[in-house]
Image (cartoon, rainbow, N blue to C red):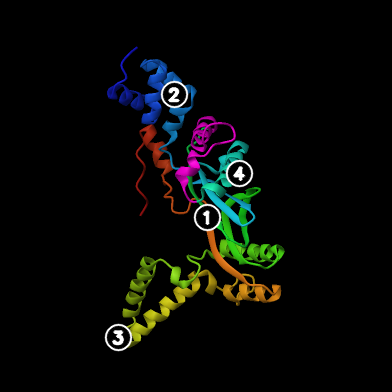
Amino acid sequence: MAEITAASVKELRERTGAGMMDCKKALSENHGEMEASVDWLRTKGLAAAAKKAGRTAAEGLVGVAVDGTRGSVVEVNSETDFVAKNEQFQGFVAEVSKLALTTGNDIDALGASSFSTGGTVAEALTHNIATIGENQSLRRAARLDVSEGAVVSYVHNAAAPNMGKIGVLVALEGSAPVETLNALGKQLAMHIAAANPLALDAADLDPALVERERAIAIEKAKDSGKPANIIEKMVEGGLAKFRKENALLSQLFVIDGKTPIAEVVAAAAREAGAPITLKAFERFQLGEGIEKPTSDFAAEVAATAGIKKPDPVA
C-alpha cells in the first residue's frame, strides 16, 4: 500500500479538482493508488462536480414551505434557467425547503441534514451537479415562526408548486381565524414581492444604508445653493421619504395605492374582532446580489479564430 502523504493529496486535488477530504478518502479507499483514486472520485461524481464549482450559479429556484405556525424559504442556484425546469432539481429544492423548517437560517446545518435518497443534503447536491452537469449551490435559507397565528407564503413567477423566481414569507401573530390570516398574509406577501421593502419598520432599516442616503441627500441639497438651514430641512425631508417608502409598515398598499400597510393590518384585525400583528417577513429574489459574468461573445469567437476585432466606427 502506497503511503498517503500531503503531497499525494495535493496531486489528486490538482488532477480532479475535488475537495481535500474527498481526496484523502479516495486515497484511503484505494490504498494510496493515484489512478484508482482518480477513478473512484469520478465514479462518485466528485471530480466532475468540483470542476464545475468555479462556474457562476445565479439562476435556479427559490422554494418555500409552510407548516402551520412556521415557514421556510431557500434559494438553490444553478448556472442556467434550463436546470430550473429539471424534475430532479425541482425535487431537491422541494425537499430542502421542507428541511429548512427544522434547520432555519443555518445553511451548514441544512447541508448536513439527512436527505431522503441517502446521505446528506450536501452529498445530494454534489450528486445533482454530477448528473445534471451544471454547478449548483445551496445559497441561503430562512425560517419564520409565530407562537399563535400563521406564516403565509407566496411565490412569484412560479416554475412549479411552491418554487419560482421570488419567494415571500409573512408571519402574522394573533388569534384571528386562520382563514382571515391566510387571506391577509397572501395579499401582504404579494405586496412584498412587488414593493421589495427593506425592513419591517423605519427603526429596522440598516443604519449604514440610511447614512448613505443622508450623504446623497446632502450633496443634492448643496447643489441647490440654498441656505444651510434650508438644506438641513431638505435632507431630513429626503430621509423621511426614504424611510417611508422602504419600511413595509409605512409603504402604501399596492392594491389601492393609498393605504399604509400598518392600516391594512389594523383594518383586518378590526373586521376579525381579534388582534393581528405583522411580526416579520422574508423576501428572497433569485440571484440578487450575485455578480453575473459578462462577456463579449463576438470578441471571444474572433480571438479563438485569431481574428482582430475591428475598432468601433467613430
Secondary structure mostly seen in magenta is helix
The kind of residue tagged 4 is Ala
**Front of the two marks 1 and 4:** 4
Kind of element beneath mark 2? helix
Tell me the residue that label 1 is attached to.
Answer: 284
- How many other residues sit within 10 Å of disc 2, few (<14), some (14-19) or many (≥20)? many
User: Measuring 53% from the left and 54% from the top, which residue is drawn there?
Assistant: 143
The kind of residue tagged 1 is Phe
Q: From which residue to which does the magenta span run?
A: 105-132
The kind of residue tagged 3 is Ala
Sequence-first tag of 2 and 4? 2
266 within the magenta span: no
Tell me the residue that label 2 is attached to.
Answer: 41
Tell me the residue that label 4 is attached to.
Answer: 94
Residue 302 in the image, given as x and y percentages of width and height: 39, 37
> Closest to the observer: 35 or 314?
35
Residue 228 marker: 3
> Closest to the observer: 244 or 267?
267
Estimate the spatial distance between the alpha carbons at disc 1 and disc 4, rounded to whole Å: 15 Å
Pointer 4 with pointer 3, Cβ within 8 A: no
Estimate the spatial distance between the alpha carbons at disc 3 and disc 2, rounded to whole Å: 68 Å
123 within the magenta span: yes
The C terminus appears in which quarter of the rendering? Answer: bottom left
Pointer 2 with pointer 4, Cβ within 8 A: no
Sequence-first tag of 1 and 4? 4
The kind of residue tagged 2 is Leu
